[in-house]
Image (cartoon, rainbow, N blue to C red):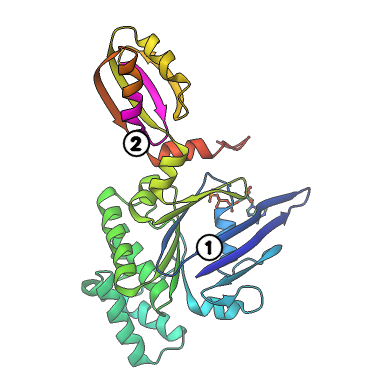
Amino acid sequence: MIFARGLARTFRTRDREVTAVRGVDIDVEPGEIVGFLGPNGAGKTTTLRMLTTLLRPTSGTATVAGADLLTDPVEVRRRIGYVAQSGGTDPNTRVGKELVYQAEFYGASRAEAVRRTGEVCSMLDLAELTERQVKTLSGGQRRRMDIALGLIHAPRLVFLDEPSVGLDPQSRSTLWEHIRRLRAEAATTIFLTTHYLDEADALCDRILVMDGGRIVATDTPDGLKGRYAGDAVTFGVAGDAEFARVLLADHPAVQESAVDETGLRLTVFDGARQLPELMAVLNSAGMRVVSVQLARPTLDDVFLTLTQPVKGTA
Ligand SMILES: Nc1ncnc2c1ncn2[C@@H]1O[C@H](COP(=O)(O)OP(=O)(O)OP(=O)(O)O)[C@@H](O)[C@H]1O
């Protein structure tokens, strides 16, 4: 659904050149929900704007929803939906009217526009709100309306730029349900940017992590956790914990080791699988293990492992 190779963008300011995106390859399969993560200034928005035809790449090629980004941007635009961070909808207009207008803008007849408005409203639980003025909607309802606008022409691929920013936890989880439903019921492919690692974890089949204009990792949320941030394993031992540490510190799966008041603390890649062997090493040296704890890493751990703070930014 997205096939991009070497996509790059440089901006020229008055006194210097800023390379925002340094040649990225992106592959997204039909029906996937893919999350785009990265610290401020990583190049996410610039990449999204290139993929949605709003910004011309300095170099590289891409096919988006089956159309060529460089030679056929008009067709790309017809085939995709783009939901920006804050909608520019007139606050006084009514929800249903705005959706019908948007469908007509994409070339639908009035009857077709009304039918399509009914469909998206039912999918996003907006059917009760079509007569409401936009300014009376709650934050969560407003975001759902923005998404409905992005879906009105039934695109096969939709880009969501930070979909749940500013929403309370309840509205966020409702929105996530709706995003999952879009994929389940309409087989829509979804490419979203987010700063919330829990959102990426809850929603995405795959995550691309961007840093310094490059994609530094691509994997499933669990794959990233397994690969880039080891599991925390804590052994309580009867006897000398430092001796236990020395026994295990050089084991190939052990990344870090330390002793504190809770016992021997290890960072272990693929901890659940390694645990029996680590215990066997201790047992065969005569150490008795009295307790074991295994904690999986969070995406925050992965994110901090993979991304570097940019100098000069907070
Ligand atoms: N029009 C522009 N002119 C000059 N520099 C720009 C322009 N747009 C973006 N940049 C620079 O390109 C880099 C990447 O910016 P971009 O907005 O793509 O990052 P981002 O990952 O979306 O960040 P955020 O999470 O803060 O939205 C930054 O250093 C930014 O200052």
Q: Where is residue 249 in the image (x, y as percent from the top left)?
A: 45, 19
Identified by mark 2, the residue type is: Arg
Q: In this view, does 59 lie to the left or right of 212?
A: right
Mark linked to residue 64: none
Instruction: State the residue position of label 2.
Output: 273
- Number of marks drawn: 2
As drawn, the label of residue 27 is 1
Q: In the rendered view, would you say 85 is above or below 296? A: below
- 264 or 7, nearer to the observer: 264
Q: Is residue 11 left or right of residue 302?
A: right
Residue 84 coordinates in the image, percent (x, y)? 47, 63
Residue 267 lies in the magenta-colored region: yes
> 176 or 258: nearer the eye?
258
Rendered position, 163 above or below 252: below
Please tell me whether residue 192 is drawn above or below residue 125 in the rendered image: above
Q: What element carries label 2?
A: helix
Does residue 86 appear left or right of residue 234 in this picture? right
Which residue type does callout 1 highlight? Asp
Q: Distance between the residues labelled 1 and 2?
A: 31 Å
Judged from this view, the residue extending furthest toward the top is 240
In which quadrant of the rendered image does the C terminus lie?
top right
Identify the magenta region.
Answer: 263-278
| Dot 1: element | strand
